[in-house]
Image (cartoon, helix red, strand yellow):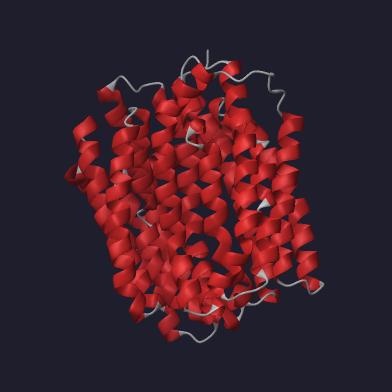
């Protein structure tokens, strides 16, 4: 029988392959399209993300997490959620279709009416594959997800680039996104043998909704928060400025959310199996926290240091106004995995009510900071995101301490050495931009200095995470 440790290691490997391959392909395709399209095109898409993502929260309704956590789930549970997803997706698409002209008027951008009505189809199409995705996550089967993701991205990337070169402008992004949802959903039905039964159980729905509804409201608050900046910037500033912000935000989130997503997808079902053993849960939680910081902190700080040459080389100088935004956001999103892991723990322990209350408090603070910084420009708003991230970290870790006795001070002690070394790493990576003129040499030398310093310091001070990561990467590869 496969041990929990072996299962986790295998799942992490395939989750990493899936995530890095998908993000890598997406990054390359995104770079090609961004070099062709204008910042305004990306700004237009950024204006409507909040509406489609909010609809997605209602469709999922927290049921995915509820199904993963439920130990004795049945086919009736899966079928019930499947039909719920379909009905709710159609309902929200009809609402979006009707509201499209009013949203376009809000932004004074007429083209948004037709864009919203096309983009909204993603909601309905995606609902048909949501249960299959949940089944893969329950089985921790990221090998199959890797196949689906890579095939989808190669096909849709070709569509997006072709349309961009052909002069379709923002519609290249619209149809690339629609094709991605349609193809991935179709592949999920082909690869996954599950088919819904003709049954809908109110008892099953009520059981899952009891836990999932609180996560749904929490997810709704989080989605509104993550997109409220786009709404305010899109309304108050130009679509080009919104394009710079969304591009900076996307680049800042790339390493952070990518690696966090790998860890979260694997550890939530795994930690759920030890939810009743507080000591074991706390011990594994701290290891997970330090390993996440060890990987993500230096990457974010190197991205901070190399922001300008990266954008100049890959996106061209038309995207240069995004550089200072990217550098500021790196300091905010480097703590994203810490937030995510803390919140993951609340779900593992079944504290969805507490999860919801914390989200309400944090989002209220976020709203205050947002409207306090908006009059001073987009860059000051980015600094506000750092402040809200720090406040959220204090709140999240306080309640983690209550649940497993791993509170703010313990977590701070665990990650402080990694944070300090990463901070120096970032400034070493930035140093060549002050003395060299050529962007390529700035990128190469800065990346080299940062990487060598971080790895060398980790070895010198005997960071246990370095050995664990080395053993995981190389021993697993030898065995394979």
At 49% across and 17% down in the image, what residue appears? 203
Residue at screen point 58% across, 53% down = 52
Q: Is residue 270 above or below residue 54?
A: above
Question: Residue at image x 48%, y 79%?
Answer: 237
Q: Position of residue 401 (x, y in %)?
A: 20, 37
Where is residue 111, by image quadrant?
A: bottom right
| Label total for image | 0
Residue under the image location 36 percent in, 49 percent down: 293
In this image, 124 relative to 335: left or right?
right
Q: Which image quadrant: the C terminus?
A: top right
Name the residue nearer the viewer: 341 or 284: 341
Residue 81, compared with residue 336, is above or below; it is above
Q: Nearer the viewer, residue 306 or 153?
A: 153
| Residue 93 in view in this figure | yes
Left or right position of 70 against 394: right
Q: Nearer the viewer, residue 180 or 102?
A: 102
Image-based side of 235 in relation to 186, left or right: left
The percent position of residue 397, horizontal first and vertical second, equals: 24, 44
Find the residue positioned furthest to the left.
409
Snapshot quadrant of residue 139: top right
In percent of width and height, residue 409 lies at: 17, 46
User: Is there any visible trace of residue 418 in the rendered image?
Assistant: no
Query: Residue 84 in the image: x percent, y percent?
Result: 59, 31
């Amino acid at each position: 029988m496969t041990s929990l440790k072996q299962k986790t290691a295998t799942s992490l490997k395939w989750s990493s392959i899936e995530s890095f391959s998908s993000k890598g392909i997406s990054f390359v395709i995104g770079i090609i399209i961004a070099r062709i399209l204008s910042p305004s095109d990306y700004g237009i898409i950024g204006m409507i993300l909040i509406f489609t993502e909010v609809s997605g929260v209602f469709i999922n309704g927290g049921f995915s997490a509820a199904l993963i956590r439920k130990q004795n789930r049945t086919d009736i549970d899966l079928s019930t959620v499947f039909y719920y997803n379909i009905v709710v997706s159609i309902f929200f698409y009809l609402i979006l279709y009707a509201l499209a002209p009013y949203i376009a008027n809000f932004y004074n951008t007429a083209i948004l009416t037709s864009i919203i009505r096309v983009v909204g189809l993603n909601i309905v199409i995606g609902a048909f594959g949501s249960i299959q995705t949940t089944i893969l996550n329950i089985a921790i089967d990221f090998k199959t997800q890797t196949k689906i993701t890579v095939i989808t991205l190669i096909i849709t990337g070709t569509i997006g680039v072709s349309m961009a070169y052909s002069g379709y402008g923002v519609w290249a992004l619209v149809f690339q996104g629609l094709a991605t949802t349609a193809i991935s959903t179709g592949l999920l039905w082909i690869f996954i043998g599950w088919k819904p039964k003709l049954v809908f159980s109110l008892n099953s729905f009520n059981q899952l909704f009891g836990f999932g509804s609180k996560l749904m409201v929490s997810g709704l608050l989080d989605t509104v928060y993550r997109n409220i900046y786009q709404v305010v910037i899109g309304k108050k500033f130009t679509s080009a400025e919104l394009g710079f912000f969304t591009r900076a935000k996307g680049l800042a989130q790339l390493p952070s959310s990518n690696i966090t997503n790998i860890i979260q997808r694997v550890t939530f079902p795994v930690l759920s199996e030890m939810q009743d053993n507080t000591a074991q849960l706390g011990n594994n939680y701290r290891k997970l926290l330090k390993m996440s910081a060890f990987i993500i902190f230096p990457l974010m700080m190197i991205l901070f240091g190399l922001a300008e040459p990266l954008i100049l080389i890959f996106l061209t100088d038309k995207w240069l106004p995004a550089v200072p935004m990217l550098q500021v956001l790196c300091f905010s999103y480097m703590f994203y995995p810490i937030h995510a892991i803390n919140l993951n723990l609340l779900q593992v322990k079944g504290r969805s009510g507490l999860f919801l209350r914390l989200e309400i408090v944090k989002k209220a603070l976020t709203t205050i900071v947002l409207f306090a910084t908006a009059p001073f420009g987009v860059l000051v708003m980015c600094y506000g995101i750092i402040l809200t991230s720090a406040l959220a970290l204090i709140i999240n870790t306080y309640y983690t301490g209550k649940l497993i006795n791993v509170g703010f001070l313990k977590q701070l002690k665990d990650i402080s050495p990694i944070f300090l070394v990463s901070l120096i790493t970032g400034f070493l990576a930035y140093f060549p931009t002050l003395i060299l003129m050529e962007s390529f040499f700035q990128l190469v030398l800065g990346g080299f200095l940062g990487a060598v310093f971080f790895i060398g310091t980790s070895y010198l001070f005997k960071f246990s995470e370095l050995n664990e990561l080395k053993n995981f990467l190389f021993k697993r590869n030898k065995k394979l």
